[in-house]
Amino acid sequence: MQVITGGSKHALNGKGQTMKKWLVVLLCSAMVASSSLSFAMDVYVTSKGKKYHTADCRWVQDRDVKKLGDADAVKAGYAPCSCIEKMSEKQAEVPKKK
């Protein structure tokens, strides 16, 4: 059923289209925000070190460490440990065709 008031059915359609556009923008924003959160990784730093490490890295085992998000560690001036660089290289490798 279509409601026509004042001889113009386009006024309602225009508002509906605007609402749909805002809904799409809102949903896309939520998807981008959630996907960026899923890539965040907890890393660990020592009080005197200049690099950040994964939880299973040998350089942080049995040491007093502080847990940070990887983005926060980079902002604080820490560089990735070789264990993280190796992990990134493995993820970036493309399987060779046989």
Image (cartoon, rainbow, N blue to C red):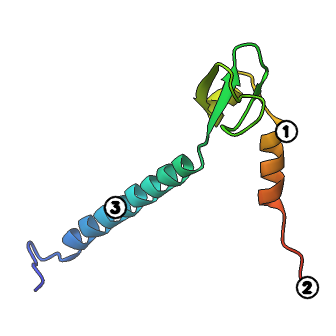
Task: Give the alpha-carbon distance from disc 3 to disc 1, as whole Å.
Answer: 43 Å
Closest to the camera, between mark 3 and mark 2, is 2
Which residue is depicted at the point 82% across and 44% down? 85
| Residue wearing tag 1 | 82
Q: Give, as a three-letter code, the residue at label 3.
A: Leu
| Residue wearing tag 2 | 98
Depth check, front residue: 77 or 65: 65
Quarter of the image where one finds residue 5: bottom left
Lower sequence index among marks 3 and 1: 3
| Residue wearing tag 3 | 23
Q: Position of residue 72 (x, y in %)?
A: 62, 29
Depth check, front residue: 44 or 38: 44
Q: Quadrant of the N terminus?
A: bottom left
Q: Position of residue 93 (x, y in %)?
A: 84, 63
Closest to the camera, between mark 3 and mark 1, is 1
The image shows residue 92, relative to residue 80, as above or below, that is below
Task: Give the alpha-carbon distance from disc 3 to disc 2, as whole Å.
Answer: 46 Å
Q: Residues within 10 Å of mark 1 (few under 14, many from 20)?
A: few
Q: Secondary structure at mark 2?
A: loop
Which residue is depicted at the point 19% across and 70% down? 12
Lower sequence index among marks 1 and 2: 1
Q: Give, as a three-letter code, the residue at label 2.
A: Lys
Q: How many marks?
A: 3
Q: Secondary structure at mark 3?
A: helix
- Whether label 3 touches label 2, CB < 8 Å: no
Q: Position of residue 20 (x, y in %)?
A: 32, 66
Residue 56 as seen in the image, left or right of residue 39: right
Lower sequence index among marks 3 and 2: 3
